[in-house]
Image: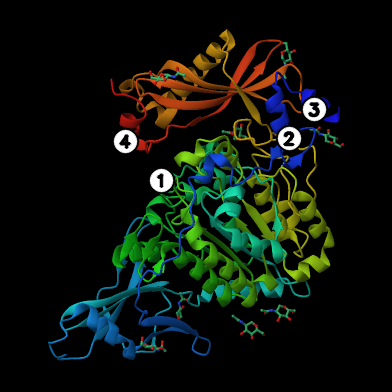
Amino acid sequence: MGTTKLCLNGILLVSFLQCAALINKKYILSSVTCKIEDADPFDEAVKNNFERIEYKRCSTLQPLTWVAYNERSQYYQLHINWTGFRQYLRMDLDLTAPLTSSPRCCYMAVERLTEQNIGLGENCEQFSSGVQLPNSTIGFIVQCYAQGKRIYTNGHATVPEQQQVRERLKQWVNRRKGKQSALSVLLIGIDSVSRQQLMRAMPMTKQQLESSGWFELAGYNKVAANTLPNLLPLTTGYNRSSVMSLCDPREELGLKRCKFIWKLYQELGYVTAFGEDDTPINTFNLNMRGFRSVPVDYYLRPYLMAAEQWLDVKIGDSQTCLGFHHASEHVYEYALEFTRRYLNDSFFGFFWTNTHSHGGSISRTTVMDEYMREYLNRLRNYGILNRSIVFFLSDHGLRAGPTWQTPLGWLEDRLPFLYIWLPPHLQQSHPEFVQSLRVNRQRLTSPYDLYVTLKHILRIGSPNHLKDLLGDAVDCLSCQSLLLPVPINRTCADAGISDHWCACRSYYRYSTLSDRDYIMAQLLVQHVNSLYNNYHNSKFVSRCEPLTLVNITKTYLGRRHTADNPTISLHRIQVMMMPTFSTYEGTIWYNSSSQEMQVTGVSRIDKIKPNCHDEQFRIKICSCR
Ligand SMILES: *[C@@H]1O[C@H](CO)[C@@H](O)[C@H](O)[C@H]1NC(C)=O
Ligand SMILES: *[C@@H]1O[C@H](CO)[C@@H](O)[C@H](O)[C@H]1NC(C)=O
Ligand SMILES: *[C@@H]1O[C@H](CO)[C@@H](O)[C@H](O)[C@H]1NC(C)=O
Ligand SMILES: *[C@@H]1O[C@H](CO)[C@@H](O)[C@H](O)[C@H]1NC(C)=O
Ligand SMILES: *[C@@H]1O[C@H](CO)[C@@H](O)[C@H](O)[C@H]1NC(C)=O
Ligand SMILES: *[C@@H]1O[C@H](CO)[C@@H](O)[C@H](O)[C@H]1NC(C)=O
Ligand SMILES: *[C@@H]1O[C@H](CO)[C@@H](O)[C@H](O)[C@H]1NC(C)=O
Ligand SMILES: *[C@@H]1O[C@H](CO)[C@@H](O)[C@H](O)[C@H]1NC(C)=O
């Protein structure tokens, strides 16, 4: 009886089987305004796409060089293991020829020329073990030669003392005198990992998080399609279109005008760092101009560009090696070095990796599971978790590949994972934060909330005058700090999430089409055409043929929530368009009383998605006239 009622309540036209399936579903959260399904990560539809892949070392040889910070001299030293050379000599040289001289090694300092260009010092500086490295750069490429052949190449990133940073830190310690010392903040992000994907591909990491007191936010919902428009709200409080008009990243000086959260931290006495692997697709660089001058105190990009150019790059199906390490490890290890160097100070570090998770495979990330679990352990063992608030997160779920095409893929795309760590002393002094995070595990949250949280952290234990300075996220004024309880009846609109990206509503499929479906399909075609017409200030309009409807491939109706307005319904419709035969899915809002319709968002969902950027746009998205 109870179940029958549940099924009839607010749900249109479900068959008995659909109804039974619905009752068995588990939910991450279930309120009168939002129901987010807690789907099985090993659903039948995706099981066959998944396998565990073993971590492979990038080289069977041991690296010969390493760097270490010398506390006394306050410089890094570059060390070399001469006895390790034998193994390299055997590899590269003819053993029968006697060595005429011992190997010689030299290093080159990486120099940032522009955001897109790097240089390496004038010449390769010969050195012997223990040499002091200059404090003017964070990256070095090392080469060793024997008998005229290069037998060894490696790269090292460092976090050298910077006088102006040290002065800033000191000055703020004085200003905060008597108050609690400022909290450090570390963000570690992995691209394209949904909450379900974390369970599936990184069970050891997940277990470590669950068993060591991290707080999960299971209803963390993305607000836009890909990385940049999800990280902009998190780092600026603005959505993509606002950023495009305020500080257009396609202009040389564009991003300089954006008030990124790390700037705010820097102005309030923090040392800052930013690192991201796979430099050609970096969040702020892909088809954009990036940062004219370095955005933070320690900027990893120039070093990684050099490493990508000079070290052995091996791009396998399942893992990307950069020299002796997986490409992502360069970022993770740098993050550790940065936080260890400034352990007793106030730091803000933002670190992001793409290489082991980006793309259409749900298996590749399994490679890094054990490393990631150990990494979390190291954060604890090094004392970092004692001092800092840590955010471990992703930006969205998978956005390509066979899993993405399934109903589970639709949900996962929208729900990236998010965990938050609070240091023990903060948990003690602010038990209400702990209480809030426990509650918020099952609440609808978004990247705008994270932005407000990052501002809230600056205010904890800081002088009162900061209050006015630290407002809300401009493009989501109803968004809030995650250290305060989020209302259970929050809607996607409240959290700055459009209906198209909202995971609060599930949909069921129907196949008997009505006139209304064709009207919606035509509306979607018009919508996509208008997006293209406006693209790059109409640069391509005259050269593109407009898209036209081929057919409707799938139709869905949104299930109702108790608090929904009965005249409004939500629809998802997939259509194929000519002349490109591309498939789009749109979410459409419909008022049955006025018969008004509105497209709330659209995704291109072809199996093989073209890389639709800039010049390629003309060829791939539309057909040329
Ligand atoms: C130097 O290399 C040798 C041979 O690979 C190795 O056994 C030894 O542990 C290395 N020493 C150091 C200090 O890394
Ligand atoms: C490097 O060290 C020298 C000598 O201590 C100092 O004068 C210089 O300012 C330092 N460079 C930076 C970037 O802090
Ligand atoms: C931090 O402070 C501790 C205790 O005073 C000290 O042992 C440690 O070396 C300091 N670490 C850094 C990186 O300054
Ligand atoms: C963390 O802090 C606690 C209490 O102050 C201390 O006992 C512990 O040694 C610290 N852990 C590390 C790894 O520094
Ligand atoms: C971005 O935010 C502005 C101002 O809040 C709003 O008018 C606009 O519709 C938003 N754009 C998108 C794409 O959400
Ligand atoms: C949520 O609940 C609060 C308090 O019960 C109420 O004031 C608010 O209007 C509700 N919001 C929605 C969207 O239902
Ligand atoms: C839509 O049109 C395409 C191309 O003509 C065809 O392959 C596909 O089967 C059609 N789908 C439906 C649902 O009619
Ligand atoms: C739906 O249409 C009716 C009739 O025009 C109108 O009164 C109502 O405000 C509309 N609802 C919404 C949510 O726009």
Residue linked to disc 1:
288
Please give the label number shown on residue 491.
2
Residue type beneath disc 2 = Thr
Q: Which of 511 and 422 is in front in this view?
A: 511
> Depth-wise, is mark 4 or mark 2 nearer the camera?
2
Q: Residue at x 38, y 23 (%)?
A: 581
Q: Position of residue 427 (x, y in %)?
A: 79, 66
Q: Where is residue 133 in the image (x, y as percent from the top left)?
A: 39, 82
99 to 409, vertically: above or below: below
Residue linked to disc 4:
615
Q: Earlier in the sequence, mark 4 or mark 3?
A: 3
Q: Earlier in the sequence, mark 1 or mark 4?
A: 1
Residue type beneath disc 1 = Met
What SS does tag 4 mark? helix
Q: Label 2: few (<14), some or many (≥20) within 10 Å?
A: many
Figure quadrant of the N terminus: top right
Quarter of the view holding residue 43 = top right
What SS does tag 2 mark? loop
Please give the label number shown on residue 562.
3
What SS does tag 1 mark? loop
